[in-house]
Image (spheres, rainbow, N blue to C red):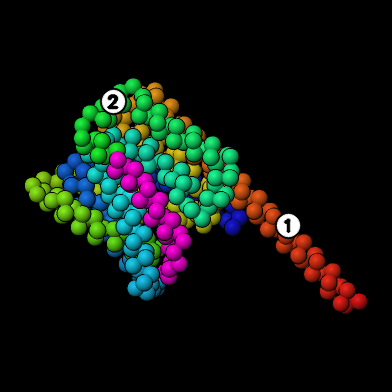
Amino acid sequence: MGLTKHPKALVLAAFAAVYLIWGSTYLAILLAIKTIPPFFMAGSRFIIAGLMLLIYATLKGERIPDIKSVLKISLAGILMLSVGNALVAWVEQYLPSGLVAILVATVPLWFVVLDKRQWAFHFSNKQIVAGLIVGFAGVILLFASKGSADLFDSKMKIISLCLMLVCTVGWTIGSLYSKYQKVQGSTLMKVAIQMSAAGIVNFIGGFALNEQKDFILQNISRESIGALVYLIVMGSLVAYMAYVWLLSIRPASLVGTYAYVNPVVAVFLGWLIADEHVNTQKIIGLFIVIAGLVIVNLSKEKRAVNTEHTSNKFSSAKNAGSTQIHGKRNS
């Protein structure tokens, strides 16, 4: 689609939603779990958002996929939104939201490591390997910075750091599973099912962790309710819709730049509103991680352009050859 077919202001607003809203969700999670247990909060967020999307998709006339597809879509949703997202909410009880956002920003690097089908390309490409090294070096710097010793001063913080590894790997595996599994259903219907399934599992996880103990609905603060509403409406609906729309009109590599911006927004808001400590080495580590992501993505984009160019060249040559053959037959 041509650029002129879409109002510039609308495109900019969509990018702002993906950049700023998704970046702000880490702070919103921190505020929401002050008086709402993390798994119950995540369960409420995704069940409500999922049902809203399901109703919207149904009103549009979209059909619910077959049971086999529903199960596959649900598994992907559980991996991404329960393992990959609800655990983030739990972890934010013990780790700064800015640090969590930086660790989540390593997901594109995990895609390179865990996407077995692309290993031949990824690990034969020096630029991608260099990007991986740079990105993970930035993470190491975060934990080697001054003041990072307090990240290991309690058992729960150490467990939380380990769970962050589980979160990022879980999101990556769920995304790859969703990418390679052939299922029925539109993108909107898939997301509705993913959110609904994850919401149910999140509630089950909450009960398994005994979150209902000492949890009283009347004790939920307005701040937490407001944060939850923000996560449902802005994080799970508005920003996601903007993301899907942008993917349909702009290159994925451009839309994917949200991974560079989200942690910057999260770190800034954590410092500004939640009084989270930010030092020079943490800032340097953040930008080194982002540099690694940029190097990897630029290499992938270059490959995509080259592949398209080669494909077009081959197609042109094939058409030319076909024309010559038809010419000889006609002569």
Image quadrant holding the N terminus, namely: bottom right
Circle 2: element type: helix
Q: In this rendering, does residue 229 appear at all? A: no
Circle 1: element type: helix
Count of picture labels: 2
Q: Which mark is residue 236?
A: none
Label 1, on which residue? 313
Q: Residue at x 15, y 55 (%)?
A: 207
Above or below 287: residue 308: below
Q: Residue at x 41, y 41 (%)?
A: 105
Horizontal side, residue 206 vs residue 188: left or right: left
Which quarter of the picture shows residue 56? bottom left
Label 2, on which residue? 149
Q: In this rendering, does residue 86 appear at all? A: yes
Nearer the observer, 69 or 41: 69
Disc number lying in front (2 or 1):
2
Q: Earlier in the sequence, mark 2 or mark 1?
A: 2
Q: Which residues are magenta?
A: 162-187
Q: Are marks 2 and 1 in contact (CB under 8 Å)?
A: no
Q: In the image as oriented, which residue stretches furthest toward the bottom?
A: 330
Local crowd at mark 2 within 10 Å, few (<14), some, or many (≥20)? few
Is 170 part of what is drawn in magenta?
A: yes
Q: Residue at x 25, y 48 (%)?
A: 228
